[in-house]
């Protein structure tokens, strides 16, 4: 037989074999039903064909039930179904008639991470595999990751909880529920226990809020944020916070995805947030994810608790500030509520004293907050939530002073503002790879001020009268609709797609008359109303470029339309992250637009915060933000450095501060300057700015001491119109040096002592320091340049002692503290006095917060 | 946020405290101030001086070594002003209505000072006053202004109402300020049709609505613009400003109402003769001045008025009023105006 014949015979034989194999795998098998376990299928195949199986029963999900199409299927189709549904790899050896079943190289696991006690989902919990951070949970506590089959261990870590190591089962098809046990110890160690847990995201340790107190003496989220490097409080008595050279109006503040316009009460006495109502807080200063937009400087994303699904949790607090109540718990088996209420009673305490020593007839200042949320779970993977917030501030004063001849004055001022929203949210896990999150809602912000002044005086022996009345209103209404989809791909990482729609309605109004109206109803006014639509589409993706490098990218397209103009911006967001052992290095770039501006009355007298929209004449504000961040963490110590630079475009200011309103009362005299807001667009100047800075922080635990030190150097400059010949000048919130330091001594598991110290360079303001000759021959004061002076440096040291007592059925917590323990008289503002004993001009510094006691008692059960 | 700061103002009532601190002006650098407000009714006259520190209580340093050149941009002619050694520089020429002027000032070792302005055209204005009775039966005077807009210029106007002091008023000394200007007596009870507001005019009463008792306006007066004024009448309102830069033709209307209380408070518009009897002499109640101004002068006057009103305010809590300047490489104002005056009986 020739070689050619042998080859031909082999080929022929192979063809016959192939034909036979094909016949074998295409042979139809009879199945008793269409839903069978893997082991049942294997038995059927073995009984109806010549094939036998080889596998390790420990590695194969033999009991997993599979769905087979029909009761008569080919062997090939059945094998494909087993492969697909059991996530195994199958190899068929035709010669030996052996089918080998192998486990997969990698497998997918998805789960919800919940609080073991309350059943609340944990947002931003970190998932680690092989000592590397691989994912974090989304806003519903959900994650989906791919794991190496041979390394099925994952570690789940969330701040304030005991971390948990979980052995993932490759054949678990449904989404898991993994619970973490909260650390009930009040003295939570700030830093994570393990070296590899680098601070990769921006979620704030809510347990740490116990170490931060507002001026009013209660635990304060905004105060905690002000302790972050790069965040400045500005000066004494200032509401809100400034982030990396931005203004307070450039912070995007969200509560359950609804926008909030004011985060603080009454000059920063307290923030609007109630810690007991909050599930998670995310604070972002750079590398903004594409899902966020509309503000230039930061994102504060607060999520309310759904409510304890298992038991009722209650808290009642009483303090100098007021009373706070909280309750959350289940209603039935699938529904929970979270209710919170705060009412201040400062006014009741202080008013009698004030009235006794001044000519004030009526004084009241109060603020309230109310949070409520009800959540219903249709299934473990589908829930509907209704959230609402209502908060307001009110300050009211009335004074009068008349002598026997009816000469004197009467003065009435009332100012109120407040946020409120209602939101309906539906979240559903569509399948392991797709997660849907939607919400619709309405958010309102109302600001209203009313000032009336009436004076009678002698003029050439006759009684003359002077009256003035001004009303300022700013009403914002937003209708919001959001749809977001999370997609988890084993190959290309995690995606988030979304649409945000907001309908803005905005009514800034200032009216004035000389007709004195004493505490009467506000007059009917016809104001200008602006309506605009904002639509944003975004996609963001996070995927690993290598085991050490992650790339998070996103793009947001924002369209803003009014009757007269349209604006569209593409906003790229990039974050490149390198992580090696205990080191992490991030490079980020974000472009952000802001369609709403804040025009603040820069003068004394009645304030007028007018939120105004972008129009055809007033383009949106734009910012480009570059940041490099380095973190290192080892044992209980961590360290970080950041360098950043950002630009601002289309920022606006009143061309001249006098343009809006001034009704200033000094020594019972009315100094009215100007009231004219008839056309704010023609009265503003445009400008641009840039800011840059350096930040560092160090945290650590030494024995019973937790230490935390932050330092930031920040400069923020503006160029507005022709001011200073077009040269850059410091922004009014420019505060170059900011230091915050905290020492916490854990006396034992229940008692702790906290010292907080904050320092900030004085903010800039314009002082008239130069004289020039006026056209009337009189000297006129002018500034040598804009913002040429600074307030004195701001700093204060606070001390707090927390004592917890366990009682039957609950815990009692005492917070005792002293604000500004060394009685630093920080400047609230300064003014120039030329009438001085020395004859030379001096600055008069006005302070409002000397050393203050703080006390609060809480009972939790 | 300002509103919170206001809230804090309330707290100041409770426990604020004040503390004095001295301060210094470091590295003070004096700048040049040029003041020149021109009209067709006065010769060229400008003033140059240096700024000084707030701590400096000496007189302002006058600049007498400058070379001041005026160029009429409308006809290309140039001339220099002569120094008067008091910081003033003059020339016996009058600016021309409707002309644009450039000023260049050279001072040794200083950058050249430069500015441009124009002298607005003569106003075409009609004034009508009506006696109107309000719902309470009080007699108020309603004064309507109607200005015919010059389509070739941007329009900036300032008006001021002054009380006429009968002691100063007589036929020969009528309106001392305004003798150079056209006078148009206006009857106080002239039942004319209401002023229309075509041409996109300002809504009646929107600006300068003097409904109510007025504050004596001694803060700023037109008198300050005129060196040769001896007569200081009492201003009843601070100058009011309006502009219609978008209007290139047509009428601009404005209206103000003088309340009966105001009228009655200054009803001494009679003259008592030597025999002690009241002369039924026709003495005007008010003088109304209306001025067309260059855009820079308009901004200057506005901000100057605001500054004067807010002079007491200079604090970190309030951005101070910055008086407008159109002088490149210096400070001050170079502006032009044209004025008309009316008596209201």
Image (cartoon, grey):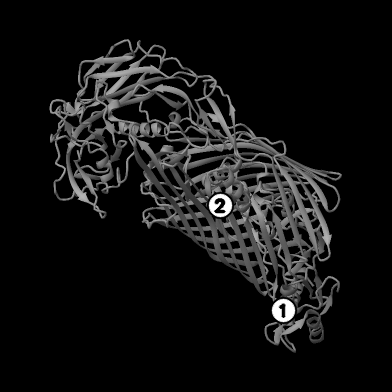
**B204 or A360: nearer the eye?**
A360
Q: Residue at x 37, y 13 (%)?
A: B63
Q: Position of residue A636 (x, y in %)?
A: 82, 46
Q: What residue does disc 1 label?
A: A76
A610 lies above or below A647 = below
Element under disc 2: strand
Left or right relative to B28: residue B328: left
Q: Count residues near mark 1 (Cα–Cα under 10 Å), then give few for <14, some for 14-19, many for 20+.
A: some
Q: Which mark is residue A364?
A: 2
Q: Residue at x 18, y 50 (%)?
A: B194
Total marks drawn?
A: 2
Tell which tag, 2 or 1, sits nearer the viewer.
2
Q: Residues within 10 Å of mark 2 (few under 14, many from 20)?
A: some
Residue under mark 1: which chain is it in? A
Q: Secondary structure at mark 1?
A: helix
The reply to whether residue A78 is in sight is yes
In this view, B282 is above or below A350 = above
Quadrant assignment, res B237: top left
Q: Give whichever of B88, A484 is nearer the camera.
A: B88
**Where in the figure is residue A293, as x and y percent of width and height?**
54, 53
Question: Residue B270 is drawn in which quadrant?
Answer: top left
């Amino acid at each position: 037989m020739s070689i050619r014949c042998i080859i031909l015979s082999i080929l022929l034989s192979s063809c016959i074999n192939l034909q036979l194999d094909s016949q074998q795998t295409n042979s139809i098998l009879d199945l008793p039903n269409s839903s069978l376990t893997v082991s049942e299928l294997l038995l059927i195949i073995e009984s109806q064909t010549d094939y036998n199986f080889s596998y390790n029963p420990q590695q194969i999900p033999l009991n997993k039930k599979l769905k087979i199409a029909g009761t008569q299927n080919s062997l090939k189709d059945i094998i494909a179904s087993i492969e697909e549904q059991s996530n195994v790899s199958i190899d068929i050896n035709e010669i030996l008639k052996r089918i080998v079943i192998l486990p997969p190289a990698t497998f997918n696991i998805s789960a919800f991470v919940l609080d073991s006690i309350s059943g609340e989902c944990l947002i931003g919990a970190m998932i680690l595999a092989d000592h590397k951070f691989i994912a974090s949970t989304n806003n519903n506590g959900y994650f989906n990751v791919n794991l190496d089959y041979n390394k099925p261990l994952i570690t789940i870590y969330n701040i304030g909880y005991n971390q948990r190591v979980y052995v993932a089962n490759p054949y678990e098809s449904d989404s898991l529920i993994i619970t973490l046990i909260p650390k009930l110890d009040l003295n939570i160690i700030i830093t994570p226990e393990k070296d590899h847990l680098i601070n990769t995201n921006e979620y704030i340790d809510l347990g740490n809020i116990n170490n931060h107190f507002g001026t009013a003496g209660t635990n304060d989220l905004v105060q905690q944020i002000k302790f972050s490097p790069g965040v400045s409080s500005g000066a004494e008595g200032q509401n809100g916070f400034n982030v990396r050279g931005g203004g307070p109006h450039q912070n995007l503040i969200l509560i359950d995805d609804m926008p909030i316009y004011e985060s603080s009460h009454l000059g920063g006495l307290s923030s609007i947030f109630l810690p007991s109502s909050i599930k998670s807080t995310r604070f972002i200063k750079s590398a903004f994810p594409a899902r966020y937009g509309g503000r230039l400087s930061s994102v504060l994303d607060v999520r309310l608790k759904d409510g304890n699904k298992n038991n009722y949790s209650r808290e009642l607090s009483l303090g100098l500030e007021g009373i706070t109540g909280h309750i959350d718990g289940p209603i039935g088996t699938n529904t929970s509520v979270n209710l919170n209420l705060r009412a201040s009673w400062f006014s009741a305490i202080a008013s009698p004293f004030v009235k006794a020593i001044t000519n004030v007839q009526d004084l009241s200042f109060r603020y309230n907050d109310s949070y409520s949320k009800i959540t219903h779970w249709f299934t473990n993977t589908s829930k509907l939530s209704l959230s609402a917030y209502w908060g307001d501030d009110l300050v009211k004063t009335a004074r009068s002073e008349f002598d026997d001849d009816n000469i004197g004055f009467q003065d009435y001022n009332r100012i109120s503002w407040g946020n409120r929203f209602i939101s309906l949210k539906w979240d559903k896990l569509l399948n392991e790879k797709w997660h849907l999150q939607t919400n619709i809602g309405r958010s309102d912000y109302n600001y209203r001020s009313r000032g009336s002044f009436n004076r009678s005086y002698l003029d050439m022996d006759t009684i003359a009268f002077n009256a003035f009345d001004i009303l300022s209103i700013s009403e914002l209404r937003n209708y919001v609709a959001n749809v977001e989809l999370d997609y988890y791909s084993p190959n290309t990482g995690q995606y988030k797609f979304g649409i945000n729609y907001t309908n803005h309605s905005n009514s800034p109004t200032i009216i004035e008359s000389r007709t004195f109206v004493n505490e009467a109803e506000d007059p009917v006014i016809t104001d200008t109303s602006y309506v605009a639509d904002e639509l944003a589409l975004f996609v963001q993706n996070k995927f690993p470029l290598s085991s050490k490098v992650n790339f998070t990218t996103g793009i947001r397209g924002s369209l803003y339309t009014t009757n007269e103009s349209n604006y569209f911006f593409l906003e790229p967001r990039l974050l490149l992250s390198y992580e090696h052992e205990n080191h992490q290095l991030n490079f980020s770039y974000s472009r952000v637009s802001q369609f709403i501006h804040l025009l603040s009355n820069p003068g004394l007298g009645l304030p007028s915060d007018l939120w105004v929209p972008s129009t055809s004449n007033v383009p949106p504000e734009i910012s480009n933000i570059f940041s490099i961040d380095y973190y290192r963490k080892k044992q209980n110590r961590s360290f970080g450095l950041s360098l950043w630079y950002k630009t601002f475009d289309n920022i606006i200011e009143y061309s001249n501060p006098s343009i809006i309103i001034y009704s200033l009362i000094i020594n019972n005299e009315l100094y009215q300057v100007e009231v004219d807001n008839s056309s704010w667009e023609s009265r503003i100047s445009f400008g641009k700015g840039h800011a840059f800075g350096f930040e560092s922080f160090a945290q650590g635990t030494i024995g019973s001491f937790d230490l935390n030190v932050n330092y930031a150097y920040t400069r923020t400059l503006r160029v507005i119109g022709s001011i200073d010949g077009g040269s850059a000048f410091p922004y009014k919130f420019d505060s170059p040096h900011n230091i915050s330091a905290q020492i916490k001594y854990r006396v034992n598991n229940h008692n702790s002592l906290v010292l907080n110290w904050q320092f900030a360079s004085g903010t800039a303001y314009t002082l008239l320091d130069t004289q020039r000759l006026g056209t009337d021959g009189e000297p006129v004061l002018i500034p040598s340049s804009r913002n040429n002076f600074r307030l004195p440096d701001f700093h204060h040291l606070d001390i707090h002692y927390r004592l917890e007592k366990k009682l039957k059925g609950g815990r009692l917590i005492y917070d005792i503290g002293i604000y500004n323990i060394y009685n630093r008289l920080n400047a609230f503002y300064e003014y120039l006095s030329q009438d001085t004993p020395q004859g030379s001009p001096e600055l008069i510094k006005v302070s409002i917060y000397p050393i203050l006691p703080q006390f609060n008692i809480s009972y939790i059960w | 946020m300002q509103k919170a700061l206001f809230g804090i103002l309330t707290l100041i009532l409770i426990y604020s405290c004040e503390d004095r601190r001295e301060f210094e002006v470091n590295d003070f650098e004096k700048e040049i101030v040029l003041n020149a407000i021109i009209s067709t009714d006065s010769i060229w006259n400008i003033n140059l001086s240096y700024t000084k520190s707030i701590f400096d209580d000496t007189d302002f340093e006058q600049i007498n070594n400058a070379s001041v050149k005026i160029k009429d941009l409308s006809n290309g002619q140039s001339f220099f002003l002569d120094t008067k050694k008091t910081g003033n520089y003059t020339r016996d020429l009058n600016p021309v209505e409707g002309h644009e002027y450039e000023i260049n000032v050279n001072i040794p070792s200083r950058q050249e000072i430069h500015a441009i302005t124009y002298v607005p055209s003569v106003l075409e204005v009609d004034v009508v006053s009506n006696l109107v009775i309000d719902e309470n039966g009080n007699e108020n005077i309603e004064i309507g202004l109607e200005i015919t807009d010059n389509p070739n210029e941007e329009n900036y106007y300032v008006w001021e109402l002054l009380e006429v002091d009968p002691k100063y008023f007589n036929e020969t000394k009528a309106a001392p300020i305004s003798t150079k200007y056209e006078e148009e007596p206006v009857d106080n009870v002239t039942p004319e049709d209401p002023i229309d507001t075509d041409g996109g005019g300002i809504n009646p009463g929107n600006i300068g609505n003097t409904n109510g008792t007025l504050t004596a306006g001694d803060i700023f007066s037109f008198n300050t613009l005129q060196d040769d004024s001896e007569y200081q009448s009492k201003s009843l309102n601070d100058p009011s400003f309006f502009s219609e830069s978008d209007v290139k033709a047509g009428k601009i209307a404005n209206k103000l109402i003088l309340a009966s209380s105001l009228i009655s408070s200054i009803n001494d518009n009679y003259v008592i003769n030597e025999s002690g009897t009241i002369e039924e002499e026709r003495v005007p109640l008010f003088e109304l001045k209306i001025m067309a101004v260059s855009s820079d002068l308009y901004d200057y006057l506005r901000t100057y008025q605001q500054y004067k009103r807010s002079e007491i305010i200079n604090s970190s809590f309030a951005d101070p009023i910055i008086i407008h300047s159109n002088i490149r490489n210096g400070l001050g104002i170079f502006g032009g105006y044209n004025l008309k005056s009316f008596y209201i009986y």
